[in-house]
Amino acid sequence: PAGPAQGGPVGLVHGVHGHGAHGAHHAHHALHVRPAAHLAPAQAHDHRPVVDDVVYALIQDLQKADERETALLELSKRRESLQDLAPILWNSFGSVVALIQEIVSIYPQLAYPPNLTANMSNRVCNSLALMQCLASHGETRPLFLQAQIPLLLYPFLNTVSTDRPFEYLRLTSLGVIGALVKVDDPEVIHFLLRTEIIPLCLRIMENGSELSKTVATFIVQKLLLDEQGLIFVCHTPERFYAVATVLAKMVEVLVAAPSIRLLKHVVRCYLRLCDNAHAKEVLKQCLPDGLQSDPSLQRLPENILRALEEDHATKRWLVTLLNTLSYR
């Protein structure tokens, strides 16, 4: 499924980056630094994009307290263009530890009263952007899960402050989880279902910004699309009603303030829930008014109908949902 911006839902959730005061000078200096031997590419015949001396120097700078902030910023800027940045980060001495240090160092700022500045948020979001890089790459993703690094992000997802630094932090953390679920890896689903990710996402779906809601709903959708996830959610009435209640509240909001990118994921969640026989019978009785119509869709609220004109795939999914639930 397409996300809220190019590249899927996680394409833009890497925070808002500031610019280091000495970034230009640092990059110029890095041109003259050779990579250490333990950072050299493992295979001379590797045909992936070449990582140059500047990048190797920036990775080494993660070990230096006074250079780390600039290194995080510059590496996060480059992560889209270097396919092999993730394994180099993972296998270079101390780099992942440096990223973890950045994350845990702001835990005290999350306590009440929360005290997170924009600069703190930007800096940790750059670390999270590199974590997203590790989560996306086929070589590093299994190691990322084995180390249980996603759990370090849950305190950020658990915050409720609506201040912008916290919103960026939640959104970027969701981006890391979104990168994990995007690849349809059963091991990812198995790992996440053993954690509190669904309750955390449900709260963001209910109370977050539109973009955070969109990414959180995408994550729940991807969990549901996996057979393990559907069984998990429908295993007890409490789990099913927790998901169904939040989806219904989202539809109420969408009737008043439509967003096709959010509506798309909500409809997909409902459609997937119908693949469970018990859930399907319940949804026949409790589908939100904002989605109830005959398959012609003419009885839908005007705002929802107008939003559906922007996305014919979502319109088809809704028609399929109404047919599945025997709405006439």
Image (spheres, rainbow, N blue to C red):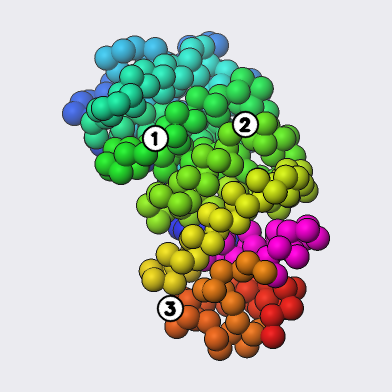
Image position of 225 (left or right of 71): right
Q: Position of residue 318 (x, y in %)?
A: 63, 74
311 lies above or below 100:
below
| Chief SS of the magenta region | helix
Query: Which residue does the numbered mark 1 point to in the structure image?
Result: 159
Residue at point 50%, 65% (across, down): 251
Image position of 266 (left or right of 191): left
Query: Which residue does the numbered mark 2 point to in the structure image?
Result: 195
Q: What's under tag 1, amino acid-wise?
A: Thr
Image position of 229 (left or right of 205): right
Q: Earlier in the sequence, mark 3 or mark 1?
A: 1
Q: Position of residue 69 (x, y in %)?
A: 30, 23
Q: Which residues are magenta?
A: 263-284
Callout 2–callout 1 Cβ contact below 8 Å: no
Query: Which residue does the numbered mark 3 point to in the structure image?
Result: 303
192 lies above or below 34:
below
